[in-house]
Amino acid sequence: MSKPPSKPITHAFESVALLLQGGGALGAYQAGVYEALLEAGIEPDWVAGISIGAINAAIIAGNPREARLAKLRGFWEQITTPTLGRMFGYLLNGREVDDVSHGMLNRFGAFEAMVAGVPGFFKPRLSVLGFPTDAISFYDTAPLRATLEEYIDFDFLNARHMRFSVGAVDVRSGNFTYFDTDSYQPRIRPEHVMASGALPPGFPPVEIDGECYWDGGLVSNTPLQWVFDNATCRDTLAFQVDLWSARGEVPKDMNGVAVRQKEIQYSSRTRAITDQLQRLQQVRSAIATLLKDAPESVLAREEAKLLAEFADPKDYNVVHLIYRTAPYELNSKDYNFSRRSMLEHWRAGRADAHRALRHPEIFKRPKTPEESFRTFDFKASDDDHPSKE
């Protein structure tokens, strides 16, 4: 496992953003990434998330620095409390098992979550009388409100010690909406976080101020576009933590088909978005350069003033951390809330983040305007030769 740096890391950026994708039980990977950042002395001043990423983001933004890691651990331990079928996997924690046995353990964990729900998160609507005919979801997420209130200090979150953003979809209009502490009034509440993770048909919509909202992942499972549309005028170092990989292999069986389908659907084209943002930033930088050399007569024109508002000579580095599916994981990996899987995902996130943090180039500003938006993607296989997009 990658070790934390021996001393705090310094960087040349004005802002550090942590962007957390949705992915259910895989979200423990993001908690491991945050632990690595904390160990490296890197403090985000903006956290944005979708779905489970919204919950992790709210726990981070809703607690003082010294309490965040303990609160993250408390949340993830609560929702992976060993019960019945998951007890077998819990007893085997720390013991080596082969891929076949590992896959069976994952099936047990996912099956129990599907049938019995997850403590402090959701419970099935089934009863001895069957499934309610007027239900609009398979599960009830009422238990999540109390859990959020236990692990998130909403007064602290709304005091804006750190900027916080979560995305959800308006059920009536289909519009993508962000609830952001810098723009939303009067305050962020538990239902805003719950709405971001209300993925149908599993979970019901959440009502906020008379409107109903579903999971933001229905439109886009990453907050990357929102953050960079609103991060102008500040040099930004962003850690984009994805739980679904856009790239993968052609499936060889039906389980592989189901896994790959989810990866493509929920990866939300992060790489395509970064390509677009990179091109856009190059255009902004070019405009800023041209305006510096423009005569006063040109600068006084309304067209030039409009271009000046659009120009942004700032620099952006995006460190892309992606959870890589283990060979034994199944289509149910996002709702396998077993303790063993949670710990595996947490450790993977911590190790991947430490691997990325060993590369000093991510903390340096680019040398030319043409490189004002850079994306770094580090993998275990190319640790010594990382890709830069």
Image (spheres, grey):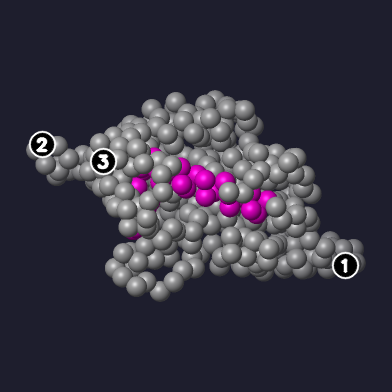
The one nearer the camera, 68 or 95, is 95
Tell me the kind of residue under disc 3.
Gly
236 sits to left or right of 276: right
Secondary element at tag 3: helix
Q: Position of residue 285 (x, y in %)?
A: 77, 64
Q: Residue at x 14, y 37 (%)?
A: 127
- The magenta segment is 330-357
Mark 2 burial class by Cα count in 10 Å: few <14, some 14-19, many 20+:
few
For mark 1, does the 10 Å Cα neighbourhood hold few (<14), some (14 to 19), or many (20 or more) residues? few
Query: Which residue is disc 3 drawn over?
Result: 85
Q: Vertically, is 77 above or below 168? A: above
Q: Amino acid at mark 1?
A: Ala
Q: Which residue is mark 1?
A: 294
Three-letter residue code for mark 2: Val
On the image, the x and y values in percent for residue 34 come to: 58, 42
| Residue on which disc 2 sits | 128
